[in-house]
Amino acid sequence: MTANTHADGATPTDASGGGEDVPSIDLPTAAIDALARAPNDDERSPTLAVDGFRIASDDDADTYIFETSEGRRTGLSRETLAEAAREHAVVVSDWYVFEHVVDDEGPRGAFLRWLEGATERLDRLDRPNRPDRPDDRLDGHPEDGDAREPREPIRDRYASLATGVTREWGELRITVTLADDGTRRYEIRHADATGIDRDHLESHEDPRTARSIAKHDADGRYRPLKTAPTLPTGWVFPELDARGCYETVETFYPATVANWDRERRGALDVSHWHETMARQTGIYGVIETWDRGEGHEHVEWVAETCCADSQCLKRREWEYDADTPLSVDGGDGVFPCREPCSLVVSAARQWTKLESEAERTYEFDLTPSEKEQVEAIIDAVADGRVGEIREADVYEGANRYRTRFLRAKRFDDDGNLCGIPTDPDEGTTVE
């Protein structure tokens, strides 16, 4: 990351602006130095052409050419180039931030651009023949319009950044704002903490702190799945820089940005259920035996159980195999799930053993209300609502007192429902 110091005597201004909603930028000296070096950074071309401006060097005269949609200046010295840059501080600042502060055209750079809606450049970067790659830089006179078209989106974006641009990533609420020198500041908090004053939240600075925050849910229970919608709230990272923002997000939700970026570029390498389970070895190798040539309904059950939005914030992209999609909805998450996760694999091992049992017929005597109560208990446990049912809500089937009453009435002293034992040879105890 390039250190920022403000230019001596620099006046925050933006002649290309003029709009009252576009903030003034105090362009740092580091940005002007980088701009002066830019034409010579690539030996293949003496011209840098990016969003909103072009700059070229005239080696014979030791001067610069600087062009925007408003005109073309030639014969600029280092000092007059700095003046021109300050007059167009918004576009120069935007180039400098992403080229030298963020300095990444991989997942981190793409994510930070996406956060603030800089998709106009992001889309072009993904094109095979993007016009702003060094190989495609233009020599001599740039064509009219090439430097003009991207300017307005940048100015609109800066106007939005002045008050803050907010995106949600899972349960994270990320707000990007502008510093006086055009660099970005990022605030990350839980989406449920929207509107809460920072002073009422626990403030953190170190991205590594996210690891301890994400370790347990609000009830203190360990969170084995980092993308489960159980992230506790009550905290804020108020003043992160670009790198700190990325590291914090990746600590809360590991690998989600990388997979999102792969998907965005059409390069997400999905590993479907069948091939993932075929790779399992050791105690997990048993899962492969679940595919008994009887269709893939069992995988539908697994996906419905583990991959719903209520259980995981990822959007499932894997299917049974490349030719056999699952009918269960994959969810609406912003970042994709490229393969069955370790939690799915672990649960599938248990279900593989349970589902190997042959079905038996048992007869129980239950009243209609008791049958409905059993169904209500299963629903409440599956949806994680048991803790929400108050002791006084005796009309709820999964109410603790109603459940205790059912057990007192229908269980024998050995815990058998209606006194009917389970044959030890048919038991469900699985290690």
Image: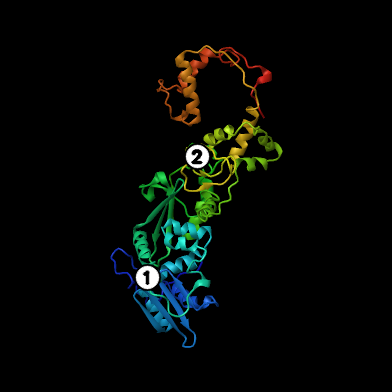
- Most foreground residue, 289 or 259: 289
Relative placement, left or right, of 328 versus 9 is right
User: Pointer 2 and pointer 1: residues touching (CB < 8 Å)?
Assistant: no
Q: Which mark is residue 288?
A: none
Of tags 2 and 1, the one toward the viewer is 1
Callout 1: SS = loop
Q: Which residue is at the far bottom?
A: 61
With respect to residue 138, does 298 lie above or below?
A: above
Callout 2: SS = loop
- Most foreground residue, 143 or 356: 143
Badge 1 density bin: few <14, some 14–19, many ≥20, Cα 10 Å: some
Q: Which residue is mark 1?
A: 148
- Most foreground residue, 322 or 195: 322
Q: Which residue is at the far front?
A: 323
At 52% from the left and 41% from the top, the residue drawn is 216
Q: Quadrant of residue 411?
A: top right
The type of residue carrying mark 1 is: Arg
Q: Which residue is mark 2?
A: 217
Residue 269 horizontal/vertical position (percent)? 58, 50
The mark tally for this picture is 2
The type of residue carrying mark 2 is: Asp
Residue 115 horizontal/vertical position (percent)? 43, 56
Which quarter of the image is occupied by the C terminus? Answer: top right
Residue 30 visible in rendering: no
| Earlier residue among tags 2 and 1 | 1
Residue 286 horizontal/vertical position (percent)? 68, 34
Residue 376 visible in rendering: yes
Badge 2 density bin: few <14, some 14–19, many ≥20, Cα 10 Å: some
